[in-house]
Amino acid sequence: MCGIVGYIGDKQAQSILLSALSMLEYRGYDSCGIAVVSNGIKSYKNVLRVAEMKEIAPQIIGTVGIGHTRWATCGEPTRVNAHPHFDCTGNIAVVHNGVITNYPVLKQKLINDGHEFVSDTDTEVIPHLIEKYYKGDLEKAVELALLDIQGSYAIAVIGAGENKLVVARKDSPLIIGVGDRETFVASDVPAILDYTNQVIYLDDGDIGVITGDGIKIKKDGLEIHREEHKILWSVEAAQKAGYEHFMLKEIHEQPKVIRDTLSEYTQMSEPIVDLENLREDDRSILILACGTSYNAGLVGKYIMEDLVGVPVRVEIASEFSCYGQTPEKTLAFVISQSGETADVLKAIRKLKGVQCHVVAVTNVVGSSISRIADQTIYTRAGPEISVAATKSFIAQLMVLYWLAMSYSKVDAKRLADILLELRQLPSKVQWMLDNGEDILQCARYLARFENVFFIGRGLNYPIALEGALKLKEISYIHAEGYAAGELKHGPFSLLGENTPVITITGQDSTYESILTNIKEVKARKSPLIALTGDGDEAIKEFVDMVITVPRVDPIFSPVVNTVALQLLAYYTARERDCPIDFPRNLAKSVTVE
Ligand code: AGP
């Protein structure tokens, strides 16, 4: 996790570093800091959010600098553990995102050589190693230091009196933003969108040296050329645009996300994934992901098995990467909004080891996952800043629907109906967004409880999981998602007046069964909130509150139900005064295992 930035140009670095850092807080926000080349190096860091830092940091004059916003992995969030970290002389400063796995050994050797450490972090070994190798050439010293290091890193380094930034990456993201007489470094694109839309994506093993004269990139000791790419995201796409929180803005963007993703893929003449051979060879599909992306994968299983008729296995990437078995040559889809999730990257490496064909579904162009997969399908959600995934989940579902429909074996009439419904989906989601009064009422009610169950069946079982994940993530209410039929196999012992149950009531063959489950829950006195289709009067007799969603073809019920549950989580968290976009202990891009 963590966000790093760097600047070199003709403007004062401090305000640019802080504004860029504020766009990376989704990567971590335990503490932050900057260092600027300024008659030596001057630095300010503390256990603060970037906005507070902007208010109180002393002004440092200088046009070359680095910055960091932290998600603590090694060492508690304290001022001393905050980045940048320094060597003994204070002449070398480093910001780092990643984990140095052999730091205990390196640290002990450096201590034996007389180096003094002040923090508990793994990062601090980097400036000390650079100091050890420094003989007047910062670039050379960084190169040599990196040879000693094991683990993952994206780093930016400055030296006293040096008019340059030295950067490097391995298994952690790093981009270079190319401006007019100024250059930026960042963990991710939103940090630099205010200044430039031209970026260079660094690859693993790249070391870059950025000076007033230009950008030099080396790999394995040889100078190489990396293309510049134009970013199509607008500055506004990464701003709140008047919404109270990024999450609310991102929820409201979903009708557009559905349109954008569909118009992109329905215009393709060639299917990009060969599912035909798969069916003939009698093989299966494997889907791997974490968190919300895993829940999207579970929905994918239901729709692909239904429409394509091939068996689909869905696995949690962190489990699979360590313990999973897979037949050779399986077709695997890996789903990751950020494209940087360490557990997913590890799973891909394992799959490639047994010659599986890996298709990445990600929202971030140039992300690590897209670089190592065999093929990439991009979701068109635009930048998602809030830690809670919303529009990226819906965009992932759209890709999965599109894949399933492209290879569908259902009859033409059914397919035409599905397509028609798909075209109406943005306006139905818009209806949800415009008519959320019942959701707000339920949220006000829910906010007083500490334990909640979400239940669903079939296609809406993953939506129960997603509803619970969203609620616990941002409102800090303990929430569990369950297959409705499972509740009686244990969780019933927890039901009662203080444990509401939210039922996702599909308008399909699951309706009667879930009604039975609702009655069972009612008999245990749990308050009941039902999400159900417009016009379902019958259910009101059995539940305490109803959230109405528009009627859709049952195959698309996960879309409208998810949007309702996102709003429910959002309003509940707001009612409880939680920091919605940046929930405690979390980060958007989980780059540690
Ligand atoms: C969702 O709200 C969470 N922030 C989290 O579960 C997330 O989906 C998970 O960490 C996976 O991230 P990815 O999609 O970027 O791989």
Image: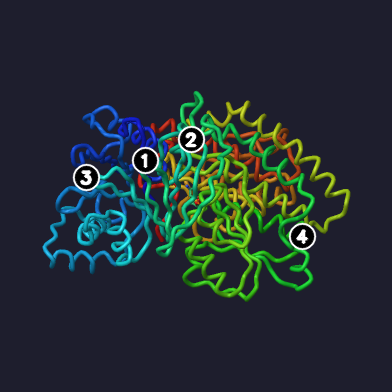
Residue linked to disc 3: 160
Tag 4 and tag 1, C-beta contact below 8 Å: no
> Going from the N terminus, do you reach mark 4 or mark 2 first?
2
Mark 3 CB lies closer than 8 A to ligand 1: no
CA gap, disc 4 and disc 2: 43 Å
CA gap, disc 1 and disc 2: 17 Å
Q: Is residue 576 above or below residue 453?
A: above
Residue linked to disc 1: 212
Q: Residue at x 76, y 63 (%)?
A: 309
Q: Position of 30 compared to 87: left or right?
A: right
Q: Secondary structure at mark 2?
A: loop
Q: Residue at x 62, y 39 (%)?
A: 531
Residue linked to disc 2: 196
Mark 4 CB lies closer than 8 A to ligand 1: no
Labelled disc at residue 587: none
Q: Nearer the viewer, residue 582 or 520?
A: 582
Q: Secondary structure at mark 1?
A: loop
Labelled disc at residue 308: 4
> Going from the N terminus, do you reach mark 4 or mark 1 first?
1
Q: Position of 186 compared to 397: left or right?
A: left
CA gap, disc 4 and disc 3: 61 Å
Q: Secondary structure at mark 3?
A: loop
